[in-house]
Amino acid sequence: MIHASPKRSDEFGFARGVAVSAWCADRERVAFFSRLRVKLTTERAGIELLAMLGALWSLLGLYASVARPLSLFGRELQKAEIAEFFRPGPRPSQVARVSATAPFRVGASASPEAASVSGKAVLDEAPQRILILGDSMIEGLLPRLADYAAENGHSLNAVIWYGSRTIDWANSSRLTEVLAAARPTFVIIALGSSELKVRDVEKRAVAVERMLHRIGSSKVLWIGPPNWTTDTGINALLERTLGSGRFFRSAELHFERKRDGIHPTLGSSERWLDAVVRYVVEESAVPIRLATPKKTGTPRPRVRVFSPPS
């Protein structure tokens, strides 16, 4: 039997230890570089994501400054109001009070500056770009609205399409054009007077939804028609489609009317607008600053007028 000498055994053990140490070092080196590669890959993906988000933000800003809207696969791309992201947030004391009173008559005086803390909607104190559009009822509402706009630092544009209906605005490019020109932050629609007696009233819901889609993220308030006769359901449809807080129901209010028996007188229209303002500040989902004007007789803004639809 051959026996290994102690010296040779020690040399073998030392060599084996060196080999094991080298193998462990290789494993640690491989693991280190593997972790490093994963880290670099993750950081690179994060940088690429940030770059993509930056490019997207730039494109949104560029599109917001373009006058005419663009379409993709037949659908109109809505513009983002980039300035809204940089607007200071409202203070808790700017929360509008929700009124629990019964619907008020047109003769009631509006006192929107009395709005205080509630819990429903936040009063937006910032100056607004107001656009009011719709049918001939705007003629009576516009003088008083101009006083409110001047008092509160809002700009005001108006578009009157005589005899127009929801389907006329929804099925033409006119709404898109006026929105692109005015770039409003607050849209007031006075429409429905020419649809009090329509038989296919439920079909008007599609038209209303299409109008709201085109308006996009801007605040919207719809002033219902001042009924001079019982309607076939247009007010109920508007209230249901717009949801709570964006529809002012005018149908049951008392109006003094002109000789045609349809349009409210100028004085009645002024009180009507005061009632709408009170609703906006105290009860609506889109309250804005509308302090009572100290002066009246503000010059009317430039009004864009369209002939009745054929």
Image: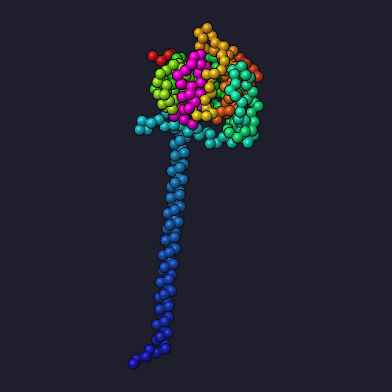
Q: Is residue 299 left or right of residue 210?
A: right
How many dots with numbers?
A: 0
Q: Residue at x 58, y 28 (%)?
A: 283
Query: Quarter of the image containing the C terminus?
Result: top left
Residue 224 sits inside the magenta stretch: yes
Depth check: give the residue in front, 20 or 227. 227
Residue bounds of the magenta highlight = 212-241
Q: Is residue 161 magenta?
A: no
Q: Position of residue 171 (x, y in %)?
A: 39, 22
Q: Looking at the rendering, in which quadrant would you find the N terminus?
A: bottom left
- Image vertical order of residue 9 relative to residue 165, above or below: below
Q: Residue furthest bottom?
A: 1
For the residue pair 130 and 213, the one nearer the viewer reads as 213
- Residue 139: x and y in percent read 52, 14
Residue placed most toward the observer, 88 or 232: 232
Residue 161 showing in the rendered view:
no
